[in-house]
Image (cartoon, rainbow, N blue to C red):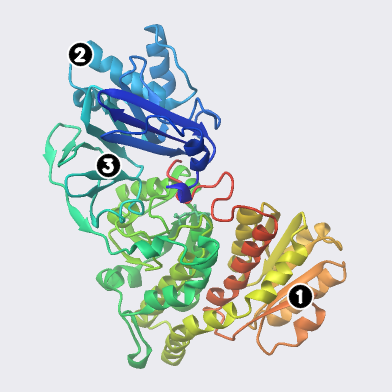
Amino acid sequence: MEYRGYDSAGIALVNNGKLNIYKKKGKVAILEESNIGEDLNGTIAIGHTRWATHGEPSDRNAHPHQSAGGSLAIIHNGIIENYGSIKEELTAKGYTFNSDTDTEVLLNFIEDIRKNNECSLEEALRIALKRIVGAYCILIVDQQDPDTILAARKGSPLVIGIGKGEHFLASDATPIIEYTKEVVYVNDYQIAIVKRDELVLKNLGNERETPFITRLDMELAAIEKGGYQHFMLKEIFEQPGTIYDCLRGRLQPEHGLITMGGVDAYLENLVKAQRIIIVACGTSWHAGLVAEYMIEEYCRIPVEVEYASEFRYRNPVINPGDVIIAISQSGETADTLVALENAKEKGAIIFGVVNAVGSSIARMSHAGAYTHSGPEIGVASTKAFTGQLAVLNMMALKIAYAKGTIDPEVYHSLLTELNQIPDKVAQILKNTDAIKAIAEKYAGASDFLFLGRGYNFPVALEGALKLKEISYIHAEGYPAAEMKHGPIALVDENLPVVFVATRDRFYEKIVSNVQEIKARKGKIICIVTEGDTHIPAMADDVIFVPDTPEALGPMLSVVPLQLLSYYTGLAKGIDVDKPRNLAKSVTVE
Ligand code: AGP
């Protein structure tokens, strides 16, 4: 679970009726070191990598938390929003707390209910869950019951692996595939009573529900580095294959066909849509911005690209039948998930573009398309981004063709070009050393600007985000023409400015923008189309990418920016797979 991002870690083991808890601020390796020689045996155990919400990263706020009575331990992914009022109730009853966390409050609340109602732990949990507000995936062990783990979920992900005489519970399937491929994705408002050889699922009404077993289509190798120094570098180099996997079985340029089951099922809704709303966060939001350009240009349908967290609370106008495209690598991002639940209640059609198979957004969407990028372990999203673009491009072309808003010749040539993207990405990757040299040259910079126009504007935003995430250098992405309305004031000989300036309808315009920066001594790094000699003549550093139609360009021009951020982070000695303060899947609002 390390890859999901965290700031402290801990485990609780039940061994012969004794509960041992070990927890520490910092990496799992520190936790291991600090508990050498301790009793690490047990029949059941729970462990947690924490990403601080309530209470700063510290040993006392790390999970698991122990109940005041001492027999219970809990781990929790999520936020209990009404923990303050519950804490007051418990404090009034004489409870004291060892941490600042909402989680410890929840555990003592459950213990108190069990004591006062003289009921089972399972019943106490059910009662407590009806009182709390928020998102949670919680696991509880009781030293008095060394054969059971109690689990419950609402909003935060939980998957249970079915083994032979053993069970595994985790936030996602990656730590489980080593032991079993048979898993159950737990739904919201379900409680799981898990024993060595029994799994019972119940709803909050105490009714049993049949576990739906899914067979994982994932190999262990997919979550190993495969000889690369970092997952991020491995995932960047996997892109020729992952884009190919995303197109395979869907794109048949020779027959002018795009086959996507989810799109086919809702093609009429998509073609007739009065508007399309794209909802996402971070890198996925940037993919949405590229899709906006594509869908408006070829499908002639107005598109709004929304930050999920703002969209959720802005009380947007959603009409029944409106189409919402939800883009998410993990399929578990809380901001996106809650925004979609809200829109679904208002009658919108939810179309998911997701990478993680079986994830919450995939399961709550009416239809969708997986990006087939394989598990993405590095916190910085790379191969999932190009996978999202491949899916969104195919969707836009399919809708446009069905709608008759695209010239058939253009349609067929774009299909042919799309089919060549994997090879063109492979070409770019051959130039890695040159990009590494540029990264090392500017690794000492304190600020960066990324500029682009048209389809390249979202790529500039993505380049800036990648550099921020991986190198901790302050970076901003801007539409190149927007510079003269303010940001150009930042330009001097110390500021590297990255232009995404591939050959497109904006070429002449961006040439002027490059000259504006050059005139103010900014350091110019350009991503240009092979064969371009004009812009390279003005630039300090140049990265060439193969030619392709501008709508498909982002799948190529982003790759050098992924490498630029990777090698800058590497040059600065940063743990690029697990950058500070970031989580791979942000499961709290
Ligand atoms: C991207 O590198 C980041 N990891 C982050 O911005 C991410 O894109 C965002 O949290 C959305 O995640 P999702 O695609 O899993 O929903």
**Label 2 secondary element:** helix
The disc, 3 or 2, on the residue closer to the chain's N-terminal end is: 2
On the image, numbered disc 3 is attached to which residue?
A: 188
Q: Residue 334: x, y in percent?
A: 42, 45
Q: CA distance from mark 3 to mark 1?
A: 51 Å
Comparing 443 with 557, the one in front is 443
The disc, 2 or 1, on the residue closer to the chain's N-terminal end is: 2
Residue count near mark 2 (Cα–Cα under 10 Å), binned few <14, some 14–19, many ≥20: few
Numbered tag placed on residue 117 in the rendering: 2
Q: Residue 484: x, y in percent?
A: 78, 64
- Taking 159 as reference, is 280 left or right? right
- Taking 320 as reference, is 530 left or right? right
Numbered tag placed on residue 541 in the rendering: 1
Say if 117 sits above or below 249 in the image. above
Residue 81, visible in the rendered structure: no
Q: Residue at x 50, y 61 (%)?
A: 231
Residue count near mark 1 (Cα–Cα under 10 Å), binned few <14, some 14–19, many ≥20: some
Q: Residue 217: x, y in percent?
A: 28, 64
Q: CA distance from mark 2 to mark 1?
A: 71 Å
Q: Residue at x 20, y 27 (%)?
A: 122
Q: Residue at x 72, y 82 (%)?
A: 508
The disc, 3 or 1, on the residue closer to the chain's N-terminal end is: 3
The amino acid on which the numbered mark 2 sits, given as a three-letter code, is: Asn
Q: Residue 515: x, y in percent?
A: 82, 75
**Label 1 secondary element:** strand
Q: Residue at x 27, y 45 (%)?
A: 168
Say if 539 sits above or below 187 in the image. below
Say if 154 sits above or below 460 in the image. above
The amino acid on which the numbered mark 1 sits, given as a three-letter code, is: Asp
Say if 205 sits above or below 91 in the image. below
Numbered tag placed on residue 509 in the rendering: none
